[in-house]
Amino acid sequence: QVQLVDSGGGLVQTGGSLRLSCVASGSIVSIPVMGWYRQSPGKQRELVATISSGGTTVYVDSVKGRFTIARDNTKNTVYLQMNSLKPEDTAVYSCNVLTIIAGVAGVRAYWGQGTQVTVSS
């Protein structure tokens, strides 16, 4: 019903930057919330940032001032600009969207396949 493709991860040195993208496709009526989560080995998945359809953003404290989430509603795409990267940002980053789908009541959540971000010291 909804497919997500996230991309943009890679290997970067401390202090570097990366930009993640996630494109949603399918029978989408609207996407109230789009977001990014991350998970590193041995740790629970954590919320990184979310953005509502109206542009309201939420960030985990550890990325405030360094990461910026944005979305293009015309393209059903969410971005995560990551600056001043640190080794502790190393993780698999996955996008998550809450969608309203044609012909289906309620809101459904979908996940991207994940993209690896590795920050070397």
Image (cartoon, rainbow, N blue to C red):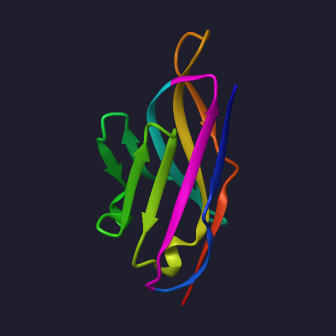
Q: Quadrant of the N terminus?
A: top right
Task: Specify whether 38 is left or right of 115.
Answer: left
Is the residue 96 above or below the residue 117 in the image?
A: above
Quadrant of the snapshot with the C terminus: bottom right
Question: Which percent across, then down, holds residue 116?
Answer: 66, 66
Point 51% across, 75% down: residue = 88
- What type of secondary structure mainly makes up the magenta span? strand
Residue closer to the observer: 95 or 60? 95
With respect to residue 118, does 27 lie above or below? above
For the image, the number of numbered tags is 0
Q: Which residue is drawn at 59% across and 14% down?
A: 102
Q: In which quarter of the image is residue 42?
A: bottom right
Rendered position, 54 above or below 86: above
Q: Does the magenta stretch include residue 97?
A: no
What is the quadrant of residue 114 in the picture? bottom right
**What residue range appears in magenta?**
15-29
Q: In this view, does 61 lie to the left or right of 10?
A: left
> Is residue 23 found inside the magenta-colored segment of the image?
yes
Residue sitting at 53 percent across and 52 percent down?
37
Which residue is at 57% across, 82% downward?
12
Q: Residue furthest front?
A: 74
Q: Where residue 113 sits: x, y (%)?
A: 70, 50
For the residue pair 21 and 112, the one nearer the viewer reads as: 21
Q: In this view, does 7 lie above or below 5?
A: below
Left or right of 102, for residue 81: left
